[in-house]
């Protein structure tokens, strides 16, 4: 269980995390979602006692992390894959980490096996790909058989197989009653893995709810209607309290009225419909609409630098594209 | 990862028996220290530099024994200087050893793993200091021993081989090892405060070499009073037997110089402890 209360971190005039309060429950996978620069990593570092909060408190299993007698058995963390000395072998890194808590070498061998690293364990970490680094970080987090796991962007750089493995691992750890808190800037990834989502943007909590609730509470359902009598239909449904928008002369986006009702209205009025499609908001759209105002690095700003006039920009602020996951390294070596 | 294992708990032992203790942290730091190539390179360099410098010094002493002019120039230098004088350059490599133990972790991000495992932080600093201190002391003794063996054939002709059974010779050998140990500890402190390898090494070179050199060109009395407390001059003072050993420069007594070096180490470590505890990792 992780409990943050009014957690705040300021770097000079910049507020990275702004009074966040949330609880991460054991037995579930909680996703920590937000655009780049939203404050996810800073929050995680504060949980681990690496960064000192400017204000507020955060406890893990009832105490500040540093006050636990054997911290590695309470929390295992993958904070970033680069938190490993590049001149040491994976095996020696894990052995040194294990030694701080008197964890036997046998356990080191186990986590190496578990994370699929046996073939590279005796190689120096400097030559590791991003994905192998991630696996080593996860191995390190599992060393103390901890009650709580904190994983910052665990699937970064993993191949599809590795992504699936992390997903199953997170779910399995939660099913054992552990607390699993993992961050991502990819809604699709979190939606597949997490039961509960905490959304952060510009250092503030934007949503804290079960996955299903976030999806339903998103942009809502709209119906796409194509008809040669668009104006007539728009007037009809507007009378029923629907909201209508239109991008093309014969195309309407109707929200507030269900598709069957629109069909019946059109039939009664003798209006021909060429298309009648209910459009469910996707998770991605729900996420976009939640974070639209809080994206740290907006493409709009970039456009302004390129000299585009304000009038050329679309009315809605363009959101920085959420990068599709791209495994950057070849993971073949660690099969 | 086709055979992704889904058993995460340890098959032997129980997590509840895992404990963070200072002994465990010391062991962890020892594993870390041993498992880096840079450790062995710097240790090797230290020993090599000590032996090579001793050979040079022994050659000069040999020459002086047969040449009145050279003998007058060198004065009555004690024979033990031939085997300890390598500290002048060895202090740089032990400073690098001490600094890298911590700056290497900042450079690679390892420090976040270290401080996650030891969130109270200071035990990790003390463990690093103890290991660097003990290893440096041992390496210095080995370096002096090899210097003794290497110079013996050359010095024996003129009966200049230092007598290891002599109390003064033993004191100077211990002083040399102690001085290098203090320098390494100061370096751990400087590395912790500065967090960058290059910056730390630059600072240490300035402290160990540049400042004493600059001071030696200045004649003002107050400069000389301060210069006495610079590490290099304290090192000379700790190892002085005859007046000629100090090269004609006024130095503190060996006892006071040892205390002054200890103060340098303690101050550097205290400043390191405060910054490590307070700063974000």
Image (cartoon, coloured by chain):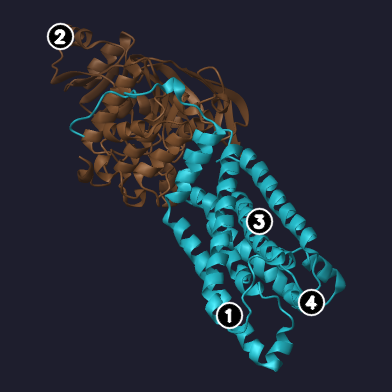
Chain colours: A brown, B cyan
Report how far apart the C-alphas of labels 1 and 3 lie in the structure.
32 Å
Q: Dot 1, crowdedness within 10 Å: few (<14), some or many (≥20)? A: few
Q: Position of residue B181 (x, y in %)?
A: 62, 56
- Residue B109 shows up from this direction: no
Q: Are marks 4 and 2 on the same chain?
A: no
Compared with B98, A39 (above or below) is above
Q: Which mark is residue B182?
A: 3
Chain containing the residue with disc 3: B
In the picture of the structure, the residue carrying the numbered disc 4 is: B218
Q: Are marks 4 and 3 on the same chain?
A: yes
Q: Is residue A288 left or right of residue B18?
A: left
In the picture of the structure, the residue carrying the numbered disc 2 is: A267
Chain containing the residue with disc 4: B
- Residue A95 shows up from this direction: yes
Residue B40 figure quarter: bottom left
Report how far apart the C-alphas of labels 4 and 1 lie in the structure.
40 Å
Chain containing the residue with disc 2: A
In the picture of the structure, the residue carrying the numbered disc 1 is: B156
Q: Is residue A278 left or right of residue A290?
A: left
Report how far apart the C-alphas of labels 2 and 1 lie in the structure.
118 Å
Report how far apart the C-alphas of labels 4 and 3 lie in the structure.
27 Å
Chain containing the residue with disc 1: B
Instruction: First in sequence, mark 4 or 3: give its number.
Output: 3
Report how far apart the C-alphas of labels 4 and 2 lie in the structure.
104 Å
- Mark whose residue sits in front, 3 or 2: 3
């Amino acid at each position: 269980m992780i409990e943050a209360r009014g957690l705040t971190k300021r770097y000079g005039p910049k507020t990275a995390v702004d009074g966040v309060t949330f609880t991460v429950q054991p037995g579930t996978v909680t996703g920590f979602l937000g655009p780049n620069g939203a404050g996810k990593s800073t929050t995680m570092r504060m949980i681990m006692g690496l960064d000192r909060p400017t204000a507020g408190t955060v406890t893990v299993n009832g105490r500040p992390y540093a006050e636990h007698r054997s911290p590695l058995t309470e929390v295992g963390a993958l904070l970033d894959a680069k938190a490993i000395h590049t001149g040491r072998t994976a095996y020696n890194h894990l052995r040194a980490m294990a030694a701080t808590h008197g964890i036997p070498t046998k356990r080191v061998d186990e986590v190496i096996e578990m994370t699929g690293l046996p073939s590279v364990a005796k190689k120096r970490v400097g030559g590791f790909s991003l994905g192998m680094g991630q696996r080593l970080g996860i191995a390190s987090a599992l060393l103390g058989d901890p009650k709580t796991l904190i994983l910052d962007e665990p699937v970064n750089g993993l191949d599809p197989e590795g992504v699936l493995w992390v997903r199953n691992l997170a779910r399995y750890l939660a099913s054992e009653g552990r607390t699993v808190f993992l961050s991502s800037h990819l809604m699709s990834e979190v939606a597949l893995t997490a039961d509960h989502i905490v959304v952060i943007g510009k250092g503030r909590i934007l949503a804290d709810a079960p996955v299903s609730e976030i999806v339903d509470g998103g942009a809502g359902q709209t119906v796409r209607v194509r008809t040669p009598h668009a104006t007539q239909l728009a007037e009809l449904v507007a009378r029923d309290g629907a909201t209508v928008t239109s991008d093309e002369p014969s195309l309407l986006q109707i929200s507030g009225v269900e598709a069957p009702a629109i069909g019946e209205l059109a039939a009664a009025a003798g209006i021909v419909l060429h298309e009648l499609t209910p459009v469910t908001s996707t998770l991605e759209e729900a996420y976009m609409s939640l974070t639209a105002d809080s994206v740290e690095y907006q493409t709009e700003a970039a456009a302004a630098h390129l000299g585009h006039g304000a009038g050329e920009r679309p009315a809605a602020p363009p959101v920085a594209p959420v990068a599709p996951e791209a495994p950057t390294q070849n993971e073949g070596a660690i099969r | 990862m086709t055979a992704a294992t889904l058993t995460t708990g340890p098959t032997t032992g129980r997590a509840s028996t895992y404990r963070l203790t200072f002994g465990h942290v010391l062991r962890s730091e020892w594993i870390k220290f041993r498992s880096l190539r840079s450790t062995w390179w710097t240790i090797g360099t230290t020993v090599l530099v000590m032996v090579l410098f001793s050979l040079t010094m022994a050659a000069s002493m040999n020459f002086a024994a047969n040449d009145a002019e050279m003998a007058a120039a060198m004065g009555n230098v004690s024979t033990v200087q031939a085997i300890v004088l390598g500290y002048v350059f060895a202090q740089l490599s032990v400073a690098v050893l001490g600094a890298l133990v911590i700056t290497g972790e900042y450079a690679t991000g390892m420090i976040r793993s270290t401080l996650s495992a030891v969130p109270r932080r200071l035990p990790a600093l003390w463990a690093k200091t103890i290991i660097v201190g003990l290893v440096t002391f041992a390496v210095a003794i080995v370096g002096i021993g090899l210097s003794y063996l290497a110079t013996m054939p050359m010095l024996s002709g003129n009966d200049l081989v230092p007598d290891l059974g002599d109390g003064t010779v033993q004191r100077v050998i211990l002083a040399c090892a102690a001085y290098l140990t203090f320098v390494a500890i100061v370096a751990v402190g400087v590395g912790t405060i500065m967090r960058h390898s290059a910056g730390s090494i630059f600072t240490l070179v300035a402290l160990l070499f540049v400042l004493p050199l600059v001071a030696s060109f200045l004649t003002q009395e107050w400069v000389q009073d301060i210069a006495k407390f610079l590490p290099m001059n304290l090192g000379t003072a700790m190892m002085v037997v005859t007046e000629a050993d100090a090269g004609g420069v006024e130095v503190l007594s060996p006892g006071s110089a040892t205390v002054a070096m200890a103060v340098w180490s303690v101050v550097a470590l205290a400043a390191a402890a405060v910054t490590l505890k307070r700063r974000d990792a």
